[in-house]
Amino acid sequence: MNLGIAGKVALVTGASSGLGRACALALAAEGAKLAVAARRENKLEEVAQMARNLASPDARIFAADLDQEKSVTKLVSDVQARMGPIEILIANSGGPKAGTVSSLSMDDWDQGYQALFRNMLLLADLVAPGMRERKWGRIVALASSSVKVPIKTLALSNVFRTALVSAMKTLAGEVAGDGVTVNCIATGRIATDRLRELFSTAEEWKAARAEIPAGRIAEPEEFAPLVAFLCSAPASYVTGQIIAIDGGLTPTLF
């Protein structure tokens, strides 16, 4: 299938590893003009070079601290100055500190709010007006299965990723008439450094895998194709959705 995104400027945040990296490379394979952003410039350059070897010869890196508002604002400004208007946004942030509601400090809550909600919403807020003017745009926010079923030890994710999904759902209704789609992914257990951090022993990993109906933990490359499709021309009628990629883990109807 031709996704119809060759030459479109695509910004992927948190792109130095894991899900962000896989999504970036999936878009690059479709010929998107790729901008990858994260803190680790050396890792970003590896991703950008892989993208150039696929079908994104103009792929560029942008160092950014997604926890800082000024850095996020500068990121969008720099990408648009060097590459043109952003037409595709993959809003991806790192995993939050683990903890329960009662164990987390107020500073933890403030940091979670900035990183998981405010600055991800800021990214969308910065790119959506231009998308609406041009009558075309794609925003995909990577969230967590915690937006469907709260995870006991990930209170920050439960609260702020759910808030982000709610904001994106609301935004989707506001921009749909201008040819802009906004969707969210409820990410399940994918083999990333973050998941290895949460399930750090062989016994924990085995138990995590056993809870998944598919019987295994997916690789990031299995996650990325659906994200790429949501950014495509053929996906123009798919918006305001929260789609789980989780091997059947989430036991809910919606």
Image (cartoon, rainbow, N blue to C red):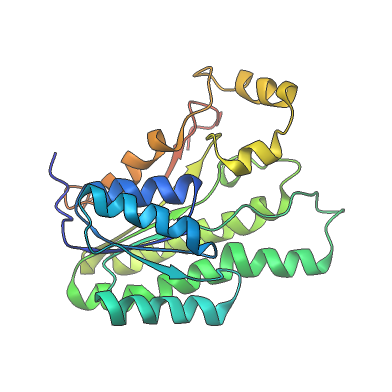
Residue toward you, 218 or 172: 218
**Residue 116 left/right relative to 221:** right
State the image coordinates of residue 143 (x, y, percent, origin top left): 52, 50
Residue at screen point 47% across, 38% down: 254
Is the N terminus in the top left, top right, bottom left or bottom right quadrant? top left
- Which residue is outermost to the right? 103
State the image coordinates of residue 176 (x, y, percent, origin top left): 27, 63
Residue at screen point 37% across, 48% down: 23
State the image coordinates of residue 175 (x, y, percent, origin top left): 30, 68
Q: Where, by quadrant of the figure, is residue 243 drawn?
A: top left
State the image coordinates of residue 36 (x, y, percent, origin top left): 39, 62
Q: Where, by quadrant of the figure, is residue 88 drawn?
A: bottom left
**Residue 236 left/right relative to 116:** left
In the depicted structure, whether residue 48 falls above or below residue 220:
below
Residue toward you, 17 or 23: 17
Residue 91 appears in the figure? no
Query: How many discs appear?
Result: 0
**Residue 84 left/right relative to 90:** left
Residue at screen point 42% across, 75% down: 125
In the depicted structure, whether residue 73 falls above or below residue 240:
below
In the depicted structure, whether residue 192 falls above or below residue 169:
above
Residue 177 appears in the figure? yes
Residue at screen point 26% across, 54% down: 52
